[in-house]
Structure formats: C-alpha cells, structure tokens
Amino acid sequence: MEEKVSSRRGFLKAAGLVAGSAVVVPSLIASTTDKTKTQSVYGEYDSNKIGTVSQLKKDREIDFSYPDEKSICKAVYIDGQVKAYSTICTHKGCPTIYNKDLQQFECPCHHTKYDAAKDGQMIIGHATGGLPEVLLEIKGDDIYAIGVDGLIFGRINNNRG
Ligand code: FES
C-alpha cells in the first residue's frame, strides 16, 4: 500500500504536478508584448468588440463573426453569465440553431445538440466534441472576443479560414 503512495508521488513529481509547481495551460497563453493579441495553440487572435452586456441582457443573444467574417458565432446570456461559441457544428460543418428555451445549440443536419451553459459540450449526436468556445473579456459594458478555445470546423488553424 505504502509503495503505491510513494510511486504515485514520484509520478506526480516527475510530471511537475505537485503543489508549488508552475501550471501551464496550453490552450491559452497571453502575449506579453502586445496586449491586443492573444496567442493560443489554435492561433493568434485580435481583440474585437462584439457588443455590450446591456444589449445581450435585453436580446439574450448576439450574432457576430470571429476571428474572421467566415466564422459565425453567437454570444448568449445564461444564468447571469456571458458565453459565446462558434455556431458551426463540429460534425460536418452545418450551422447550428440556438434554442433559447433549452439553452442549447441544435444542428438541423444530423441533430447533434450542444449545451450552451456547459462550455458548449455535446449533449447528444454525431459530433465527437463540443462547440469551440469564444473567449471573452468584459470591460465595463463592452464585450470583446479575444480568442477561441477549440478548433473551428474545417480549419487546421482558426485564423486560416
Ligand atoms: Fe451537425 Fe452532422 S453536421 S450533426
């Protein structure tokens, strides 16, 4: 029994996961030289204003394009939180439709459903992953898209549409 604890501890030390170690989040690393750019494993992003919190509270959703005009996205207001996603289905690229009542994105092509309240994760369907989440920064009332966590359907780099 003691051997297992010791082995596990050794493994964690080797992996750099013990308390006090630096934790690197590979999906998003902010650039230190340009605060308007965000670098991640999925590309380098500009900071674009997509709307306001007051507008989103009123309309419950805002359509926008990010990181370019070919990439359609939607911001939604759920349980006091602003969330945003690429609305292109990760199965075969059909545009999803947002169901406000159920707070989910629904694909009309093969019926995959994604949970807007839970980071766009897939609820049911043919896709193998969730919707890419648009990372946001809120400054006062303004909402800025600053990156995308996940690969937008059909791209090998989110910035090459
Ligand atoms: Fe959306 Fe197939 S394209 S489920």
Image (tube, grey):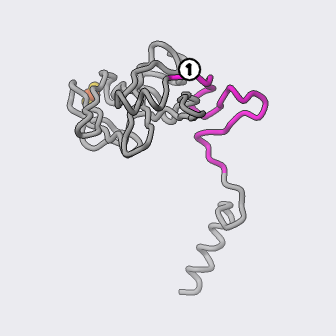
The residue lying toward the viewer, choosing from 60 and 151, is 60
Which x, y percent locates residue 16?
Answer: 68, 61
Q: Amino acid at mark 1?
A: Asn
Tell whether position 101 is magenta.
no
Q: Residue at x 54, y 17 (%)?
A: 160
Depth check, front residue: 38 or 57:
57
Could you tell me residue 5's position as x and y percent? 58, 80
What residue occupies the far right of the structure in this picture?
33
Locate residue 30 relative to residue 111 in the image: left or right: right
Residue 11 position by quadrant: bottom right
* Residue displayed at 28% across by 37% down: 104
Q: Residues within 10 Å of mark 1 (few under 14, many from 20)?
A: some
Quadrant of the rendered image containing residue 45: top right
Q: Residue at x 47, y 32 (%)?
A: 53
- The residue segment tinted magenta is 24-50
SS at badge 1: loop
Q: Which residue is denoted by mark 1 in the rendering?
A: 159
Q: Residue at x 27, y 26 (%)?
A: 97
Position above or below: 21 against 70: below
Residue 70 lies, in percent from the top left, at: 45, 13
Q: Position of residue 33 (x, y in %)?
A: 78, 30
Choose between 79 and 107: the one closer to the eye. 79
Q: Is residue 42 magenta?
A: yes
* Residue found farthest to the bottom: 2
